[in-house]
Image (spheres, helix red, strand yellow):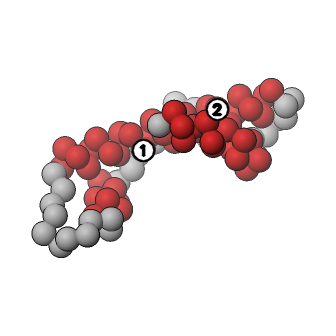
Amino acid sequence: MADPDADIIFKKNTVSKLLSSFFKEDKTRLSSDAVLLMAEILKVFVQEAAVRSQKQAESEDCDQVDIEHFEKILPQLLLDF
């Protein structure tokens, strides 16, 4: 079982490439602070998705979180972010 205290980490380079792929002009640059902020937002999003999925599974008396639990919480999660 995974360690519940383990930190979620997104590599700075991965986040930077992901964000840069949406730029329309090649001249657009991304500051390192923006990359760090986006990585933090992604971390919070993933943690919140995991917690909400777990609560959904518990409310259905399931011992394991399945994709169906995630799919049920996803619309509200997206609205909250």
Based on the displayed image, in which of its 4 quarters is residue 14 positioned?
bottom left
Find the residue positioned furthest to the right: 61
Which disc number belongs to residue 5? none
Q: Residue at x 35, y 39 (%)?
A: 40
Amino acid at circle 1 = Leu
Based on the displayed image, in which of its 4 quarters is residue 60 positioned?
top right
Image location of residue 5, percent across then percent down: 52, 30
Disc 2 designates what residue? 52
* Secondary structure type for disc 2: helix
Label 1, residues with CA under 10 Å away: few <14, some 14-19, many ≥20: some
Q: Is residue 49 toward the left or the right of residue 22 in the image?
A: right
* Secondary structure type for disc 1: helix
Q: Is residue 70 toward the left or the right of residue 25 in the image?
A: right
Q: CA distance from mark 1 to mark 2?
A: 15 Å
Amino acid at circle 2 = Arg
Which disc number belongs to residue 42? 1
Q: Residue at x 79, y 40 (%)?
A: 64
In this view, the residue in front, 28 or 59, is: 28
Image location of residue 1, percent across then percent down: 67, 41
Label 2, residues with CA under 10 Å away: few <14, some 14-19, many ≥20: some
Q: Is residue 9 toward the left or the right of residue 17 in the image?
A: right
Looking at the image, residue 6 lies above or below residue 12? above
Image location of residue 13, percent across then percent down: 29, 60
Tell which circle, 1 or 2, labels the residue nearer the N-terminal end: 1
Residue 60 in view in this figure:
yes
Q: Residue at x 31, y 59 (%)?
A: 19
Q: Residue at x 16, y 51 (%)?
A: 31
In this view, the residue in front, 31 or 11, is: 31
Image location of residue 29, percent across then percent down: 15, 61
